[in-house]
Image (spheres, coloured by chain):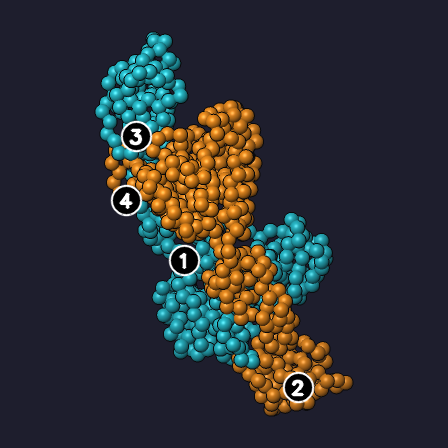
Chain colours: A cyan, B orange
Amino acid sequence: MAHGQRSRVESHLAEVEALLERALQTRSERIALAAALGRITAEAVASPVDLPLFRNSQMDGVAIRTADLTGLAWREFPIVGEIAAGPAEPQPLEPGTAIRIMTGAVVPRYADVVVPVERTIATEGGVRIDEQWLPGTYIRERGSDLRVGDTLVEADVRLGPRHLAALAASGVAEVHVRQRVRIAILTTGEELVLPGETPRPGQLFDANRFSLAALVEEAGAEVTALEHARDDIRSFGELFDRVRADADLVITSGGISEGTHEVVRETLVPRGAETRHLAMQPGGPQLLGLVDGTPVLGFPGNPVSTQVSFVVFARRALREAAGLPHLSPTHYRLTESLTSPDGMRQFRRGRRVDEDRVEPIGGPSSHLVATMARADVLIEVPDDVVELDAGEDVRTWEL
Amino acid sequence: MAHGQRSRVESHLAEVEALLERALQTRSERIALAAALGRITAEAVASPVDLPLFRNSQMDGVAIRTADLTGLAWREFPIVGEIAAGPAEPQPLEPGTAIRIMTGAVVPRYADVVVPVERTIATEGGVRIDEQWLPGTYIRERGSDLRVGDTLVEADVRLGPRHLAALAASGVAEVHVRQRVRIAILTTGEELVLPGETPRPGQLFDANRFSLAALVEEAGAEVTALEHARDDIRSFGELFDRVRADADLVITSGGISEGTHEVVRETLVPRGAETRHLAMQPGGPQLLGLVDGTPVLGFPGNPVSTQVSFVVFARRALREAAGLPHLSPTHYRLTESLTSPDGMRQFRRGRRVDEDRVEPIGGPSSHLVATMARADVLIEVPDDVVELDAGEDVRTWEL
């Protein structure tokens, strides 16, 4: 692409999403139920059992045969035993007898009602019952919740507590889920040191390793590598090949501009990646491509540019793959006016002041990382808009 | 409380929340920034440095002194060196000279503008500049984003990627956050086996250990113990004492009804807990209290009752403590009619069919664990309502 010719944000987004589609063709895996919260089912799960597993009592009471009451105003029953919840294989209930039964306990064969204890009258050695009962009352029939083979959880469901409960209740110990998208993160820039180290004049702390890892995790993907690369083509290339082996996608920060010492561009463009110069601020330079079959997204290195690039280009597709709800752009009115260069999509930082209005904070520059932390939305200024008045409607992106 | 006298849901909720308030007086801890995503700051963080750390270039270009152009239509400057991004302590810029400079590089003393490379004309050994420039153009002044000592992140902020970026950029390696609420979970019921085991007749799979652990995690708290207790007062008491040592709250399931063999009630009521019999379905029996200073919530053991109890009584306060957004009850219209016992708060399971309507699924019974998995809301039927027609408005709770 000729220098100075800038791509539109939409066409780049379409290219990135086409690339990510490839990264998101992930495999599935079987995992233990205890580790499955928030994961997405790879296929429908059929119940291996009836639910309830067995016919059981809904109350503490006595189990009897309703036929024993037919036509009678009342009847006394001898109590022939007691069934607690838990392992039990009770004998079939003899006509004219009652058995004490606890909630959840197995109902004996031929018993067809559980009369709650408070609806019985205790007698010596038995109970008196002076009501008619419909068969089945206070009995939970085997399979009345779900039949063996019925679908317990559909495919593509994000597993929440209630799904885990139903799977566990059916004895399902492992579940077949989509593998999380595995993302390797490489930050670049010889000038970077880690927080906790002491920077020499001209050195900066590496913010991107923290924000990218957090953005990936929030989007429901998995960070499989998080490395800072040296500004050396050979060592960058080796590191790239090492991390891509375990990754569906590699995301880099920095090293993609037009200048010299741009290690990501210099390493990956000869291997098939392409750079773009977008009419976008921050986030103008971008790199993308398939390198030996591995999708790569290269974001610019300024800490605000990196975050904006992820939010605008990568977040939606990754959240979708993880079954997370969309954070669709919404609309607010500006509390104050804004200016923006012609032909440039600006993503300004803003703070919601109420349900209706957003306040722009800080300038457009990509180094305002502390200002970004005070923001809760990005304010999108369209390419052809050079001025927005207070009160005008803007599209905002949730941070 | 006399048998048969039932408490209202609201008064129990108020009691539970007063108890949880105590559990939620948690300590704070210092943790590494890389582990801080989603955690809540315990105090405001002041920046230990100016941001940017040093005066640096916003462009690839040449640094000059604007005074050298004053009154001139153009001027040629010899280029006396180059400054790349990275460690550098450049000499002060001599009058009448220019120095090549890269984006992010240290701007030398006395240079007060960076002229972008595309706005210069290359000459032999130098550059020609034929525009006037305002001092400060394309220079990022030290501290222009944030001054040392200024607040980087306020107290009580849930740390997202952008906060981690700003903290890292300031060299902050550890952050002081609220400790997560530590919750020990004890499930009871001799009839329970684990998924993967083979139940004998009368045995069930333990669903509650999975749903409670997941509910606690989703509410932003930490599970410090997850155990199944035997139905034996001494061993339950010992287990309780062991797990409460590392917990701000103990949640139990099962063992709190009026019957015999109710191990949670029989162990904890003598130690100060109280049972309640709520006019609520499912979830009627409840236990709560402070046992030797540890808050305890005892939920009924049926898998649906356990989940409903957590959602109605514990979720709001825990999410609040974790800085998670409220899942406030909302309103939908019923697709079909419902009946409910008089004087009883029912929480029926429902499925949203569109933005406006909810369909009740399954009956009111607490054993319908598979039906619960198909639901996405609880439909609340007020105590004094015995019938609701299709189209009527109901309050629903997000699952």
* Cα gap from disc 2 to disc 3, whole angstroms: 96 Å
Kindly identify which chain the residue marked by label 4 belongs to. B
Name the mark nearer the viewer: 3 or 1.
3
Labels 2 & 3 near each other (Cβ < 8 A): no
Tag 1: Cα neighbours inside 10 Å, few (<14), some, or many (≥20)? Answer: many
Label 3 Cα neighbours within 10 Å, binned few <14 / some 14-19 / many ≥20: some
Give the residue type that dot 1 points to.
Val
Q: Position of residue A268 (x, y in %)?
A: 43, 72
Count residues near mark 4 (Cα–Cα under 10 Å), then give few for <14, some for 14-19, many for 20+: few
Work out whether disc 4 and disc 1 sit on a shared chain.
no
Q: Secondary structure at mark 3?
A: loop
Which dot marks residue A181? 1
Query: Label 2 belongs to which residue?
Result: B128
Residue of label 3: A84
Label 4: which residue?
A: B196
Label 1, secondary structure: give it: loop
Tell me the distance, in whole angstroms, between the alpha carbons under discs 3 and 1: 48 Å
